[in-house]
Image (cartoon, coloured by chain):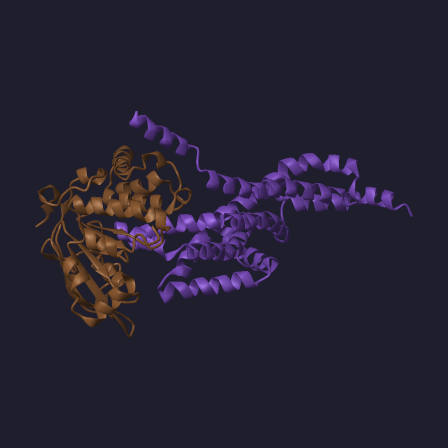
Chain colours: A brown, B purple
Amino acid sequence: MPTTAEDQTRPDRGGGVGVQSFEAASLEVSGIELAFGKNKVLRGVDLAVPAGQTACVIGPSGSGKSTLLRAVNRLLEPDAGDIRMGGESVLTSNPDQLRRRIGMVFQHFNLFPHKTVLDNITLPLRKIKKLTKEEAADAALAQLDLVELREKASARPGNLSGGQQQRVAIARALAMRPEVMLFDEATSALDPELVKGVLALMADLASAGMTMVVVTHEMGFARQVADQVAFMDHGVVVESGVPEKLFTAAESPRLQQFLSQVL
Amino acid sequence: MDIWSTLKDTFLDWESMRAVLPEMLKVGLVNTLILAAASVVLGTVLGMIVAVMGLSRKRLLRWPAKIYTDIFRGLPAILTILLIGQGLSPITRHWWGPNPYPLGILALSLIAAAYIGEIFRSGIQSVEKGQLEAARALGFGYSAGMWLVVIPQGVRRVLPALVNQFIALVKESSLVYFLGLLASQRELFRIGQDAAATNGNLSPLLLAGIFYLVITVPLTHLVNWFDRRLREGRPEEHEIEELAHADHR
């Protein structure tokens, strides 16, 4: 069952997103397998994220982290396993309908460059949610307020900094009122000075009670914001747990080796 | 021999230019514009269909598009125009009489569609895969994602090439002359050629050339205008900005 984020007891870290409430849903991934031809990328991944919580997925390149996110919203169809949102399996439902319940933020933002910031957000609201032009504009401007970019409404994405583009991408995803948010290395393409603002926004979202799966190389973020961290390698979750335990008392040698390289 | 005098008599006979000017304006220019505009519209629509078929994941759609493109790009334009214009004439004569225009327009459009299809296809394929992925992640289906997000970007990227193709089409419209035209159907080239034959100099053809340039040169500047508009944004964006600030006040 979806839970209202206002029920969450997580302390508010401040920031505009904290005032927004979400109909966050739990997410359970069990035994997901996915192969590209003979190359098995996911070999039975399990991950359970209670409603309103944040799971960070860490691991080396090629471990299947991004593929896992795309399997969750069925941009890539899993070969086996199950995905449940709010306790209900979603693999039998229409994938387009499913994606309207799951927001996704990409490493390279993927804003539509031929449209203004405002139009980037209103396009799905008008075409998918069937809002009127005025309703869509109001909803989009409200989201831009939350990411503090209202003044950029008429700008083209190409005229924004990477950090601003990523915040617009987050606003675009949030405008669809998702129950779960997926972040695929959302700060990896940003210049170091721009990373902080996007991470702060993501932390605000987590505080506000959004269910989030965050693929990240930002170990500090995972440590501070995540309710649980999952370490993936070779297409499986090798080890998972609360951040404190995972970062200070890793059990598997592979995770210990990984942490020794990145920390 | 006085070279300047010879050149002047050949190319700058003002009297024969002045004599043919009204007909060139009223008949030739109008017919050339009709031929070119109709072929541009039909060729663009067909070209988009060819491009979408060419990009399809289904071989049954992809192969016909590829074969079509190979054939119509590979044949000389005049050959296609004669084959279609004269070859189909006995069949179409029952519908619109001996008028060569519909078949001429069809032939020009089929030729243009092969090139325009390739232009569209290259433009659409140049759009980053992440764009369709983002559209799909928002909940758009494949077709909606392509039509709303990918294709508009692809088309914008190839506007200059597209306008070049339109320019080629304006020039190629003169080839329908080979289908045999009534006096009222003559386009710029044919009128210029007839007048040149009558007057014994090429000045009317030079005048026809000037008319072609009047059509084609602004088209090249249209490309620059498109580019500028894409860079600077549309006028209504300023309205959005005002709306955003107004709501803030």
Q: Quadrant of residue B5?
A: top right
Place of residue A73 in the rendered image (x, y in percent of width and height, measured from the top left): 22, 57
Place of residue A186 in the rendered image (x, y in percent of width and height, measured from the top left): 30, 52
Q: Closest to the observer: B194 or B69? A: B69
Placement of the C terminus of chain A among the 4 image quadrants: bottom left
Q: Closest to the observer: B200 or B42? A: B42
Give the residue drawn at x 40%, y 64%: B62
Q: Is residue B221 left or right of residue A31?
A: right
Q: Closest to the observer: B46 or A212? A: A212
Q: Where A65 falls versus A132 (above or below)?
A: below
Name of the residue lying farthest toward the top: B249
- Work out whether residue A76 can be spotted: no
Place of residue B82 in the rendered image (x, y in percent of width and height, measured from the top left): 59, 58
Q: How many marks?
A: 0
Give the residue drawn at x 74%, y 34%: B18
Name of the residue lying farthest toward the bottom: A38
- Work out whether residue B205 can be spotted: yes
Q: Closest to the observer: A67 or B103? A: A67
Place of residue B19 in the rendered image (x, y in percent of width and height, measured from the top left): 74, 35
Q: Where A27 falls versus A156 (above or below)?
A: below
Q: Is residue A115 left or right of residue A17?
A: right
Give the residue drawn at x 43%, y 51%: B154
